[in-house]
Image: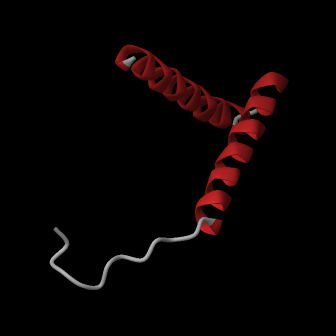
C-alpha cells in the first residue's frame, strides 16, 4: 500500500514538473501541444487556488495550550 501511494505521489510530481516546463516553453513560443498543456496547467492551478479560497476555514480552539 505504501509503495502504491509513493508511486502515485511521484507520478503527480512528474506531471506538475512537466506542466511547469510546458508553461515556460509555451511562453517562449513552443509548439501547439505545449501551449495546450500550459493552458491546462495554468487552469488547474487557478482551480486549486479558487478551491482553497472558497474552502471553509476551521477555527482554532481558543482555550488550552494547544496540546
Q: Position of residue 40 (x, y in %)?
A: 75, 37
Q: Position of residue 15 (x, y in %)?
A: 58, 26
Q: Quadrant of the C terminus?
A: bottom left
Left or right relative to 12: residue 32: right
Left or right relative to 33: residue 17: left
Seen at 32% across and 79% down, the residue is: 61
Left or right relative to 49: residue 8: left
Q: Can you name the residue that lies furthest to the bottom here?
A: 62
Q: In this rendered view, identify the residue nearer to me: 24 or 59.
A: 59
Q: Position of residue 17 (x, y in %)?
A: 53, 29
Q: In this rendered view, identify the residue nearer to me: 54 or 47.
A: 54
Q: Position of residue 37 (x, y in %)?
A: 74, 30
**Whether residue 49 is visible:** yes
Q: Looking at the picture, does residue 60 appear above or below residue 48? A: below
Seen at 50% across and 22% down, the residue is: 8
Q: Quadrant of the N terminus?
A: top left
**Whether residue 31 is visible:** no
Amino acid at each position: 500500500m505504501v509503495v502504491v501511494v509513493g508511486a502515485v505521489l511521484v507520478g503527480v510530481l512528474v506531471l506538475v514538473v512537466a506542466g511547469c516546463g510546458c508553461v515556460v516553453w509555451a511562453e517562449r513560443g513552443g509548439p501547439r501541444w505545449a501551449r495546450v498543456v500550459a493552458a491546462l496547467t495554468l487552469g488547474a492551478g487557478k482551480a486549486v487556488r479558487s478551491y482553497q479560497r472558497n474552502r471553509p476555514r476551521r477555527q482554532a480552539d481558543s482555550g488550552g495550550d494547544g496540546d
